[in-house]
Amino acid sequence: MRLQRYLAQCGVASRRKCEEIIASGRVTVNGEQIVQMGFEVDEEKDSVTVDGKTVTPVMLHTYWLMHKPRGVMTTLYDPQGRKTIVDLLPGGAPRLFPVGRLDYDTSGLLLLTDDGDLSFALMHPRHRIYKTYCARIAGKLMPEEAQRLREGLPLDGRMTAPAKVRILRSNAIYSDIEIAIREGRNRQIRRMCEAVGHEVVSLERTAMGPLTLGTLPIGAVRPLTDEELRQIKQVCGLHA
């Protein structure tokens, strides 16, 4: 592992700041001062110090982004034998848990991790993190209907929180909309659209806070980048 990454995982500073710390001559590996960028460290054997103090990695977690297809359960096991997200993970993958859920018929971004603190923070209403979806709905969504979605409407006796809604394209047969919500009620977007008279034909989550699907193929997974992890922790008030 490169020294600057090792220091960042020890919680010393951001990776870029760690590069500055290395260049300033404040770091030793096995007692030898290191100023070389990209110096390789064996985290199991080497002793690393910053300003004379030994540093060790904090507990390392795994963070993966999945592009969940339709027809897959957001669970680790399904008693009915349906396909689950576990079936999409590569062999030898660590035991990871989904942050929130996507319906069986909903595709899109799903964060998988073994970091319980981050999972809790992302799902806590206090942080009010937007989840963004692209939905195709039956019929033409009228401006006044879109405004009802934005302002909130009653579901199960409670008003939904205000949403962000953009009409991407619309005709008499269908409308494509982008909708971002901060809540996570059961089948919420489908029910909100039904409440204004439109059935959801397809639904895909494209973003969760700063995390986006990008070009990740359907059914694929990839690790979060360091910058993505820093951003998602930042919006939750956690230290990267």
Image (cartoon, grey):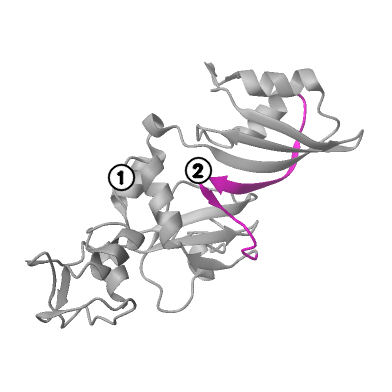
| Kind of residue at badge 2 | Gly
Please state, as top left, top right, bottom left or bottom right, where the N terminus lies in the image: bottom left
Q: Residues within 10 Å of mark 2 (few under 14, many from 20)?
A: some
Q: Is residue 68 left or right of residue 76?
A: right
Image-quadrant location for residue 115: bottom left
Q: Could you tell which of marks 1 and 2 lies nearer the N-terminus? A: 2
* Residue numbers of the magenta segment: 196-217
Left or right: where does residue 131 sit relative to residue 194? left
Which residue is more in the foreground, 86 or 113? 113
Task: Report if residue 203 lies within the magenta region.
Answer: yes
> What element does badge 2 sit on?
loop
Residue at 37% x, 35% y: name it.
124
Tag 1 and tag 2, C-beta contact below 8 Å: no
Q: What amino acid is labelled 1 in the image?
A: Leu
Residue 74: tell me if it is visible: no
Residue 192 in the image, given as x and y percentages of width and height: 65, 28
Q: Which residue is most to the front?
A: 24
Picture residue at 59% right of the left edge, 37% below the top? 187
Residue drawn at (73%, 24%) of the image: 146
Q: Residue at x 24, y 64 (%)?
A: 21
- Along the line of sight, which residue is nearer the eye, 140 or 12? 12
Q: Looking at the picture, how far across and down is residue 201, in whole percent?
A: 76, 43
- Give left or right: position of 118 versus 68: left
Residue holding disc 2: 209
Report which residue position mark 1 lands on. 238
- Give whichever of 2, 240 is nearer the camera: 2
